[in-house]
């Protein structure tokens, strides 16, 4: 069966870009090849598997889960149903940390998921820093470790299982006392209303535990702020904290931060779509 015949069969039934990528993966050729060679014959033994994947996509399953990969900050990351699919807007985190030119810092990625944030930082920062990725899900950590290994970062990043900052607070052997800390947290932040209104491919396939949070979407961040205050007592060096938020949370998260870190300086950045997305907290 030719590429052109597959495209004809599914014309109007599936997004052409998605179809191109599924064909590309099936024949192990770049999308450019798929576009340039409609006459290419797809081996019969690959057609059945290709049509199965097309069927999954038509039912609404995210393309990233079908392909098992997602690009983030120019790198290719393995993803599966145990990890949130990396979003382009989250690249803002990486850009903001790189601007700091960190050296001899402790960089902690909380809710690391596939490890896309911490691996992107470890890959792009040459100076010596301590890199940590924390997640409460053992299955997610397996994916993160595999991604780190794929980029030869397994010795550079230490992954730990635990609730938010607990592994850092409870582990006295980490030797981060008196170290300047950069904390990155892309935690669940969708309120009940926004989660219920999310697209079906998000609600039906991505882990709810990585998306929804009570308390107008800020319960996880409030728990983290409580832990940061504890860390503040044990470590008087400055901390730079980044939260990814939903745009409507800009006003309500500020008093929450001040409740636990009253002297903190708070800044907000917009994503490429012009929406408030990143909250930067500087705490002395």
Image: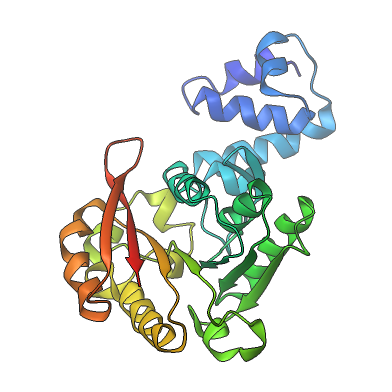
Q: Quadrant of residue 64?
A: top right
In the image, residue 74 above or below residue 16: below
Residue 161 visible at all: yes
Look at the image and tell me in which quarter the N terminus lies: top right
Identify which residue, 263 or 28, lies in the foreground.
263
Residue nearer the viewer, 219 or 30: 219
**Residue 224: image x %, image y %?**
38, 77
Residue 208 vs 194, above or below: the answer is below
41 sits left or right of 178 in the view: right
Q: Residue at x 77, y 25 (%)?
A: 29
- Quadrant for residue 249, please give it: bottom left
Residue 10 falls left or right of residue 23: left
User: Quick one: quadrant of the C terminus?
Assistant: bottom left
Where residue 231 appears, as percent x and y from the top left, is 44, 84
Q: Residue at x 49, y 80 (%)?
A: 165
Can I make out residue 68 in this image? no
Residue 80: percent from left, percent from top: 62, 57
Please tell me which residue lies in front, 179 or 66: 179
Snapshot quadrant of residue 54: top right
Count of numbered circles in the view: 0
Measuring 49% from the left and 27% from the top, which residue is drawn there? Answer: 15
Residue pictured at 65% horizontal, 13% vertical: 35
Q: Position of residue 21 (x, y in %)?
A: 63, 29
Q: Is residue 187 above or below residue 6?
A: below
Considering depth in this image, is 144 or 193 the residue closer to the camera? 144
Instruction: Tell me which colouring the rendered structure shows.
Output: rainbow
């Amino acid at each position: 069966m030719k590429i052109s015949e597959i495209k004809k069969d599914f014309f109007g039934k599936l997004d052409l870009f998605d179809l191109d990528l599924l064909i590309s993966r099936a024949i192990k050729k770049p999308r450019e090849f798929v576009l340039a060679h409609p006459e290419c014959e797809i081996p019969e033994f690959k057609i059945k598997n290709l049509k199965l994947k097309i069927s999954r996509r038509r039912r609404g399953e995210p393309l990233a889960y079908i392909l098992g990969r997602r690009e983030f900050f120019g790198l290719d990351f393995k993803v599966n149903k145990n990890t949130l699919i990396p979003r382009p807007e989250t690249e803002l985190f990486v850009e903001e940390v790189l601007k700091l030119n960190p050296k001899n810092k402790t960089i902690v990625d909380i809710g690391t998921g596939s490890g896309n944030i911490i691996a992107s930082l470890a890959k792009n920062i040459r100076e010596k820093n301590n890199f940590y990725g924390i997640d409460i899900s053992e299955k997610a950590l397996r994916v993160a470790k595999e991604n780190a290994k794929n980029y030869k970062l397994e010795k550079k990043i230490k992954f730990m299982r635990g609730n938010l900052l607990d592994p850092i607070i409870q582990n006295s052997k980490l030797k981060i006392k008196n170290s300047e800390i950069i904390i990155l947290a892309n935690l669940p932040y969708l309120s009940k209303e926004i989660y219920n209104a999310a697209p079906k491919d998000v609600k039906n396939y991505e882990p709810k535990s990585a998306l929804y949070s009570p308390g107008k979407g800020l319960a996880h961040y409030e728990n983290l702020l409580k832990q940061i205050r504890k860390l503040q007592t044990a470590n008087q060096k400055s901390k730079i904290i980044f939260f990814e938020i939903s745009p409507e949370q800009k006003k309500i998260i500020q008093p929450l931060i001040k409740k636990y870190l009253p002297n903190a300086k708070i800044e907000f950045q917009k994503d490429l779509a012009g929406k408030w997305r990143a909250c930067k907290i500087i705490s002395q």
